[in-house]
Amino acid sequence: MLRLVVLISGGGSNLRALLQRCDDPAFPAHVVAVGADRDAAGLVHADEFGVPSFMTPFTAYSSREEWGDALLEAVRPWAPDLVVLSGLMRLLPPRVVDGLGPALINTHPAYLPEFPGAHAVRDALAAGVDETGASVIAVDHGCDNGPLLARERVAVLPGDTEATLHDRIKPVERRLLAEVVEGIAAGRIDLKERA
Ligand code: GAR
């Protein structure tokens, strides 16, 4: 049973889906803690599922590195087997990537390496593409360019807005994330090998 720490910044709908999956005794992971870089709305899902949460507010530190060190200190006591960035909208400093990796993964609402960054859905719409997608990657020192663990195409439909497209991408992200967690637990995905 993998011990997961999930880090979020926003509404945490993907976190909620993962917490629901973890309620299934057949699912090989459970969330031991949820962390956020701000007073994220999604922390309510941790409360609802009786999972402890913590906050390491980015704005309380004078540099990204100091924030990262505090985040590392907040995560470590939970002794996670895997840390999941599920909508954490911050680039992690190298010390955090090295400290938590290689068991550190990120979900992203695009078919990486297309549309990396914080506005992947908006960028896909602006580019006028017919298809975008969802990805799960291992986190490295770059921005959304770590080794791909899973990805799937999602069609852009006529009339799509950022909200409607993102709402269709998220269920795919949730399924891919669950599949990757299962793959890691079963040894089919070896994060050390991919680091
Ligand atoms: C998800 O689509 C996630 O992939 C994205 O933020 C959303 C969080 O939604 N992350 C990124 O864009 C990271 N580059 P949620 O808070 O409803 O789970």
Image: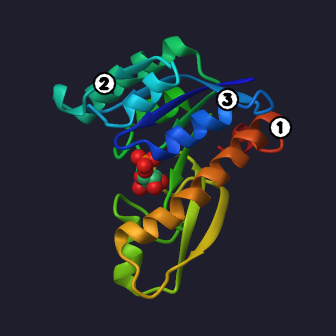
**Could you tell me if residue 63 is visible in this image?**
yes
Q: Secondary structure at mark 3?
A: loop
Question: Residue type at mark 2?
Answer: Thr
Left or right side of 127 for 177: right
Residue 118's tag is none
Question: Residue type at mark 3?
Answer: Asp
Residue at 71 percent across and 37 percent down: it is 192
Dividing the picture into quadrants, the one containing residue 74 is: top left
Give residue 142's position: percent from left, percent from top.
Answer: 45, 52
State the residue lying farthest toward the top: 77
Q: Quadrant of the N terminus?
A: top right
Left or right side of 131 for 22: right
**Could you tell me if residue 102 is visible in this image?**
no
User: Is residue 145 placed above or below 131 in the rendered structure?
Assistant: above
Nearest the viewer among 116 and 31 is 31
Residue 23's tag is 3
Q: CA distance from mark 3 to mark 2?
A: 26 Å
Please give the residue where the numbered disc 2 appears in the rendered image: 56
Question: Residue type at mark 1?
Answer: Gly
Q: Quadrant of the C terminus?
A: top right
Q: CA distance from mark 1 to mark 3?
A: 21 Å
Give residue 34's position: percent from left, percent from top.
Answer: 46, 26
Q: Secondary structure at mark 2?
A: loop
Left or right side of 73 for 182: right
Please give the residue where the numbered disc 1 appears in the rendered image: 187
